[in-house]
Structure formats: C-alpha cells, structure tokens
Image (spheres, rainbow, N blue to C red):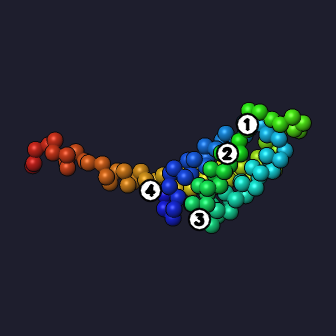
C-alpha cells in the first residue's frame, strides 16, 4: 500500500476493530476506546501510519481484563456511538485494503516467472 499504508498496518487495525464488537467493558473503558477510535480516524485521515499503529496498539491494550475492581460498575457491550465510529473506520480501512489489493496483485504477477522465462521450454 502506498503513502505509508502497508498491509500489516491496515490488517492489524481491522483485526482489533473486529474483536472490539465482542468486548464487554465498564463505561469508563468504553470512553477510552471511543477516544482511541477518534485518534485512529484522525491519523488515518492525515495519512500518519505511525500514529495509526501507535493508537491501534493502545486500543489493543484497552481490551477487557479478567478481574474488575470491587465496587466497579457493571460491564456492557459496545455502546451505539462507539459502534458507529468503529463501523466508519472499518469501512475506510477495507476501502484502503481493496484499493491497494489490485496494485499488489499486479506487482506479484510482474515478479512471478513466466513459463517462457523459466527455462522449461526449449528456445524456438
């Protein structure tokens, strides 16, 4: 992918965004997730791959934990506004992935040896 977007960056972001819909978090954690989604969206729009990678790493660390503090509010599934922001990001990232796919496919074809160049056929 050009302009700093590599398949790994986009793939990692999509992976965590897919997992996000399964998370059960306390409301404060969902607020943190929402801020991180905004950070990822802004970095993606600005073309800042390093910031996207950093924000995705923080998002991964914001996922559910096994133990809750005593007196902690109950956990909930993804709130609607967070889900909408997540869906918008997924659509943008998938578009980027698809846009770049034809370019990488044609690059692979150019790099692959052809039957004529592989030496399997005698010269004519």
Direction top: furthest residue:
66
Q: Is residue 72 left or right of residue 3?
A: right
Q: Is residue 73 above or below residue 38?
A: above
Q: The residue tagged with tag 2: helix, strand or loop?
A: helix
How far apart marks 1 and 2 lie (CA) works out to 9 Å
Residue at mark 1: 65
Question: Looking at the image, is mark 3 or mark 2 earlier in the sequence?
Answer: 3
- Residue 28 lies, in percent from the top left, at 83, 47
Tag on residue 86? none
**Residue 32 in view (yes/no):** yes
Residue at mark 4: 103
- Residue 117 lies, in percent from the top left, at 20, 49
Residue at mark 3: 47
Q: The residue tagged with tag 4: helix, strand or loop?
A: helix
- Residue 76 lies, in percent from the top left, at 83, 38
How far apart marks 4 and 3 lie (CA) works out to 18 Å
């Amino acid at each position: 992918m050009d302009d700093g977007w590599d398949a790994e960056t986009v793939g990692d972001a999509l992976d965590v965004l897919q997992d996000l819909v399964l998370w059960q978090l306390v409301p404060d954690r969902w607020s943190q997730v929402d801020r991180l989604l905004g950070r990822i969206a802004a970095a993606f729009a600005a073309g800042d791959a390093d910031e996207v990678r950093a924000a995705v790493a923080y998002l991964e660390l914001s996922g559910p934990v096994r133990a809750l503090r005593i007196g902690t509010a109950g956990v909930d599934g993804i709130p609607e506004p967070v889900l909408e922001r997540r869906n918008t990001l997924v659509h943008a990232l998938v578009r980027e992935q698809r846009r770049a796919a034809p370019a990488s496919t044609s690059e692979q074809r150019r790099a692959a040896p052809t039957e004529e160049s592989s030496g399997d056929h005698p010269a004519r």
